[in-house]
Amino acid sequence: MAERIEDYALIGNGSTAALVSRSGSMDWMCVPRFDSPACFAALLGNTENGRWLISPVGDNVSVKRRYIPGTLVLETEFTTPEGGSVVLVDAMDRRGWNSDILRLVRGVRGHVLMRMELIIRFEYGSAVPWVTQKASNRWEAVAGPDRLTLATPVAVHGEGFKTVAEFKVGEGQEIPFSLTWSRSFVDPPDPPDVKQAIESVRAGWIAWSSQVRAGEPWGEAVQRSLITLKALTHHQTGGIVAAPTTSLPECPGGNRNWDYRLCWLRDATMTLYALISSGFQEEAKAWREWLLRAVAGSPAQLQTVYGVAGERRVTEYEVPWLAGYEGSRPVRIGNAASGQVQLDVYGEVVDLLFQARRLGIAGMDDAWNLECALIEHVESIWEEPDEGIWEVRGGARHFTFSKAMAWVAIDRAIRTAENFDPSAPLDRWRALRARIHAEVCHRGFDSSIGSFVQYFGGQALDASLLLLPVVGFLPPKDPRILGTVAAIERNLLRDGLVARYDATHSVDGLDTGEGVFIACSFWLADNYVLQGRHSEAKNLFERILLLRNDVGLFAEEYDVRLRRQTGNFPQAFSHVAMVNTAHNLNRRLSPAHHRSGAS
């Protein structure tokens, strides 16, 4: 059985990633890319669906773990009841198209009996590979186009379609293991020198993470979130996946289980600010370039979500042979949200391009024709219903935030044209901007409750409305914004944290509830900053930080009743929101003030 979601840690190499549990079991990994089929899928099924365990033999083993500071190199220390201690070092490297999983067992004290169990199951835990020994210390597992090569000096043997070993580790002794993915139809690479490769990975991460501005408040937390975002960024395409996992449930045992190993346009501007305000211009530029390639083409065919390289076809289907995390079914591959109409993404794309210019990212001139085409399309569709920011499956509605983001698209195009292309149809755009604004304020605001509402004609609330002052739709101290924040505080707070909306309503078409949404809680803190409520913002921010696991990672949501993280893990959106709120509290770097036009 898989462990709690927050009991996993992430390792990665910019092509793919793996989750390692506190017990030393690697329960999830997709190769060669984030969105490739998994070869370890125990996370969503059981051990027979694939995992790689290295752990002491016996019970009552105590565990401490950490990342080497500034890196994605994981150290897990196991201490036995007899007092023996070993450290398992986990990292991931990349050599060309090949990926190396690096594991080093280091004896610290006494002698510890260890067990290794390697169960490889390609195609999401369904395909048993053919395993052959190629040398005294090397074994190959092949199924179709995929090959994994295990190299270790430990004597291993087959046991019930598993590769297993027991070995003792003494103080000062180091025992290496490597597992290398390569294409089965080309010659395999030589096994890596595990210790040397881990050192190279460590040095590479430190060189990168040292760019984070030193001495900032919450510097360690910001650095860890940025390292996580970097780990979720494909090194060639610049695309940032929402998470390295699929179908980790928003409610254990429920059906809110989605594939997040894809790239969402919706996160675009917030991600840009998180990177730029942290000093990572090249990563921000790569993200902008990914977005421009992904959305190239007819504006009518704009999707909310794309593959890692900008692929459009991310068809959703179910994997029936996986039982689901804690019985949460179905297990989904791909995401049907790619075919939904979501009006807010047009505002997100145009806003990103506008902010990229403001923030000094070069090479924006070629994007103007695309922006104009997007605006022309928004003009023709903004009055239509859509599925909204939360990609609901209960039918299209006139969502207030979607309409406000249509306003953002027009507003940013106008502000760009005023400084870049005065020949644009500014009079027409200004009239449309005013019309959309009036429509949202008239139909999206309910004076009887003193708040903006989730959709026109309803009275339900929605945490996305916290972004209205952040995107500059209204000033943060406008009475309608103050009323909306107060209404959300009254109705959507769960133990001081923010739910996206009331999930017991039928708007999303699903039949189970969910936890609080971590990013939304950061958005409330951002509103406090914009309103000058700095003490409340700081207190809420530090309250949210307590939700991180022992190595500083956030999932998508947190269940306040069960006191555990839920949803896909680790979640890029949660870490993006955390970085931006930290910078907002720092004031000097405030993305919220800059984006809203307050500074």
Image (cartoon, rainbow, N blue to C red):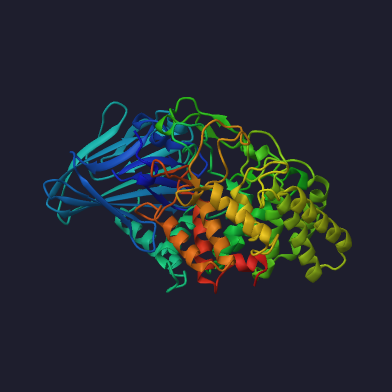
- The quarter of the rendered structure image containing the C terminus is bottom right
Left or right: where does residue 224 sit relative to residue 531? Answer: left
Residue 286 quadrant: bottom right
Left or right: where does residue 534 sit relative to residue 371? Answer: left
- The quarter of the rendered structure image containing the N terminus is top left
Vertically, is 41 above or below 526? above
Q: At 66% from the left edge and 65% from the top edge, which residue is drawn?
A: 596
Q: At 50% from the left edge and 45% from the top edge, which residue is drawn?
A: 34
Q: At 74% from the left edge and 40% from the top edge, which residue is drawn?
A: 385
Q: How many marks?
A: 0
**How far from the left and from the top, in percent, is residue 260?**
53, 43
Q: Residue furthest front?
A: 448
Is any atom of residue 233 visible in this view? no
In front of the other: 367 or 591: 591
**How far from the left and from the top, in percent, is residue 354?**
70, 63
Is any atom of residue 582 visible in this view? yes
Vertically, is 524 above or below 24? below
In front of the other: 246 or 492: 492
In front of the other: 14 or 212: 212
In front of the other: 288 or 502: 502
**How far from the left and from the top, in percent, is residue 135?**
29, 40
Vertically, is 310 above or below 423? above
**How far from the left and from the top, in percent, is residue 366?**
75, 62
